[in-house]
Image (cartoon, rainbow, N blue to C red):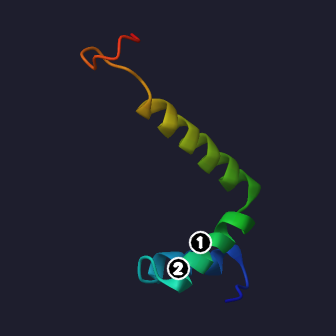
Amino acid sequence: MEFESFEQAFKICLESEDGSERQLEAMVYCLEHAPQELRDLLRQRHQEHLAARHQHHEGCGCGKH
């Protein structure tokens, strides 16, 4: 499927059935054509999420506190 803009593809991502071919095509388009600021923000948030998942807490038993 061809998209006219990031905004159009993003709208299709939100409105399409989860996991559908149409939604997946729109997601790929969004990943490739998102504005640089959005890509940077998403990359930063993803890094923060990964870091938070790997933090250790008292009682976790890993010995790396």
- Relative vertical location of residue 55 with respect to residue 42 in this rendering, above or below: above
Residue 27 got which mark?
1
| Distance between the alpha carbons at the discs numbered 1 and 2 | 6 Å
Q: Which residue is mark 2?
A: 23
Place residue 5 in its image quadrant. Answer: bottom right
Instruction: Tell which residue pokes out farthest to the left in this image.
Output: 59
Point out residue 22 in the picture as x, y percentages from the top left corner.
55, 85
The amino acid type found where label 1 is placed reads: Met
Instruction: Tell which residue pokes out farthest to the front in this image.
Output: 62
Kindly indicate whether the residue at mark 2 contacts the one at mark 1 (C-beta within 8 angstroms): yes
- Residue plotted at (72% across, 66% down): 32
- Relative vertical location of residue 57 with respect to residue 33 in this rendering, above or below: above
The quarter in which the C terminus is drawn is: top left
Point out residue 56 in the picture as x, y percentages from the top left corner.
38, 20
- Residue plotted at (28% across, 20% down): 60
Instruction: Tell which residue pokes out farthest to the bottom in this image.
Output: 1
